Amino acid sequence: MKARSFFHDAAPVQALQSLHFGMMEGRRTTRRRIALASTSPQRRAILRQLGIPFVVLVPRYEEEEEGGDPVEMVRAHARGKARSVLREAGGRPVLGVDTTVVLDGRIYGKPKTEEEARRMLTTLAGRTHLVVSGLCVVTPEWEELAHEVTRVTFRVLPPREVEAYVQTGEWQGRAGGYAIQGRGAALVERIEGDYLNVVGLPAALLVRILARRFPGVYGYG
């Protein structure tokens, strides 16, 4: 009878232990996910490519293209996006990113019309511009802010090629008016630096930060 009582009592104990273990595993998984303060499909795709688990939080931050230093601008935007969702991130590290295109010190953001995209691409044609990204990783305990710069050289583009690209509509919502991961690849002659930075997220920079701050947690460091 005692043996029966022992096994009878052990079953719920084992069930509780299993439940507790499952809850702990769930918490560990939740903590490992990064909160991405962006709705960009390109940034989501890059995080998946890197094998970094994440959740998306829509940033409550209004970007303003200032006329000052572009590096300081993208850094400020990245920090603003990350900080805007920190409270709702549930203790997860928050990632904020902002990217722009710079030529001769002038910022080329996201064109609003076909004509603006046409002018932008014509200006960039045959020249080397900079893709500048600010990146911020923030937790309740600390914040790390950095930036990355990639040099991109366009081919000389005849007006008909510019027009053909504008008609694809791929320029919409793209800094500089092009998407290097799409049809915009045909506009590019060469790049110097992080290709994924041009796509929308400086992956090498992010990996370095994660490897240092969370060694082994995301498979890096």
Image (cartoon, helix red, strand yellow):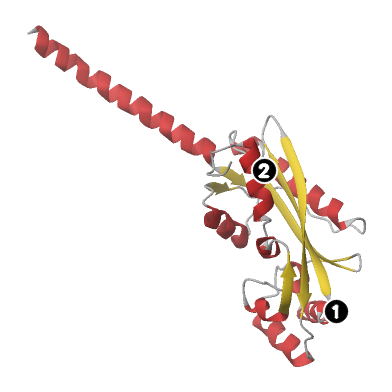
Tag 2–tag 1 contact (CB < 8 Å) = no
In the rendered image, the vertical position of residue 181 relative to residue 99, given as above or below: below
Q: Position of residue 72 (x, y in %)?
A: 86, 51
Residue 218 seen anywhere in this rendered image of the structure: yes
Nearer to the camera, 218 or 116 = 218
In the rendered image, the vertical position of residue 197 relative to residue 146, given as above or below: below
Disc 1 is placed on an element classified as helix
Locate residue 122: give its quadrant.
bottom right
Residue that mark 2 sits on: 209
Residue 61 seen anywhere in this rendered image of the structure: no
Locate residue 209: give its quadrant.
top right
Quarter in which the N terminus is drawn: top left
Q: What residue type is labelled 1?
A: Thr
Q: Nearer the viewer, mark 2 or mark 1?
A: 2
Quarter in which the C terminus is drawn: top right
Q: Position of residue 19 (x, y in %)?
A: 33, 28
Residue 123 tag number: 1
**Residue ID at (62%, 71%):** 181
Q: Residues within 10 Å of mark 1 (few under 14, many from 20)?
A: few
Nearer to the camera, 53 or 217 = 217
Q: How crowded is mark 2: few (under 14 residues within 10 Å), some or many (20 or more)?
A: some
Residue 136 tag number: none
Q: Where is residue 63 in the image (x, y as percent from the top left)?
A: 79, 54
Disc 2 is placed on an element classified as helix
In the rendered image, the vertical position of residue 173 relative to residue 119, given as above or below: above
Q: Position of residue 195 (x, y in %)?
A: 67, 64
